Image (cartoon, grey):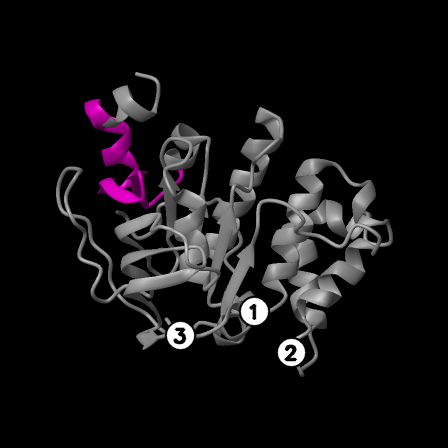
Amino acid sequence: MTSDPYGDRGNKDRSITDPDGAGTLEAHPGTGQPMNTDNAFLIGDTMTGGYGNGPDILHDCTIAVNQGEIAVIVGPNGAGKSTAMKAVFGMLNVRQGSVRLDGEDITGLSPQARVIKGMGFVPQTQNIFTTMTVEENLEMGAFIRRDDFADTMAQVYDLFPILKEKRYQAAGELSGGQRQQVAVGRALMTQPKVLMLDEPTAGVSPIVMDELFDRIIEVARTGIPILMVEQNARQALEIADKGYVLVQGRNAFSGTGKELLADPEVRKSFLGG
């Protein structure tokens, strides 16, 4: 991977994120090989678990991302993609394995405590306050902060100009793509160390999907690691530094986005040939 994988695209202002912590995450040549994740900034390490007292959905599943990278989880329906994301965020029981953020084991922490530690999570649905204005939604994102967050809000508006234009409009009146921008912007208001997105392009048009991916690249350019679940696998892997293909809650393939796109078995089984 080059030192500047996105060329001139993206916002280079790193003050929107908490820059503490670093690590390395290197893929072995080819796909279907385990990645060296020992020093990853965020890692769900060999996670096995499920919801409540129900059966295990994840089986020795490992996903990881480093600073400034985009890591994408893809796979067929029912593969455990969103479950893996929720496991990392503390929304289900991890019976074996661990979750580490910036070198700290956070496996036992609640989702609320993980937000305070620096996790920003954007769920697929019900991710905005529809009756509140755009600006009120962003203000809600700063609920854990005790400092002046005006600069962060200005940065969010720079990243998503349409939100500034519609800042006094009820968020529920926006288009699907604009609502997703509100949800991501609200997560960024916490100044997260890592941003997690569950199906950010679900239900939007191809044009809006491309625009959202451009904005995601811009966020990554600020230095924030992004862990993303996506059904639009081919498009997501095109912007991914790291990719994980899950099947029945297990790692099936892993590698860089380019490696996975070039792998014949991945293309045949998961990308439509």
* Three-letter code for the amino acid on which mark 2 is drawn: Arg
Residue 9 is at least partly visible in this image: yes
Q: How far apart are marks 3 and 1 (CA)?
A: 22 Å
Amino acid, disc 3: Gly
The mark closer to the camera, 3 or 1, is 3
Q: Give the range drawn in magenta.
A: 239-265
Percent of width and height locating residue 197? 51, 50
Residue at mark 1:
191
Secondary structure category for the residue under label 1? loop
Residue 222 appears anywhere in the view: no
Residue ID at (54%, 32%): 210
* Crowd rating for badge 1 (residues with CA inside 10 Å; few <14, some 14–19, many 20+): many
Q: Residue 145 shows which numbered tag?
A: 2
Tell me, for residue 108, which label it has, or none: 3
The Cα atoms of the two marked residues, 3 and 2, are separated by 23 Å
Q: Residue furthest bottom?
A: 146
- The residue sitting at 83% across, 55% down in the picture is 133
- Going by the picture, which residue comes out furthest to the top? 273
Front-lying residue, 30 or 7: 30
Looking at the rendered image, the quarter that the C terminus falls into is top left
Q: Do the residues labelled 2 and 1 touch (CB within 8 Å)?
A: yes
Instruction: Please provide percent x and percent y for residue 140.
Output: 72, 66
Looking at the rendered structure, the secondary structure element under dot 3 is loop
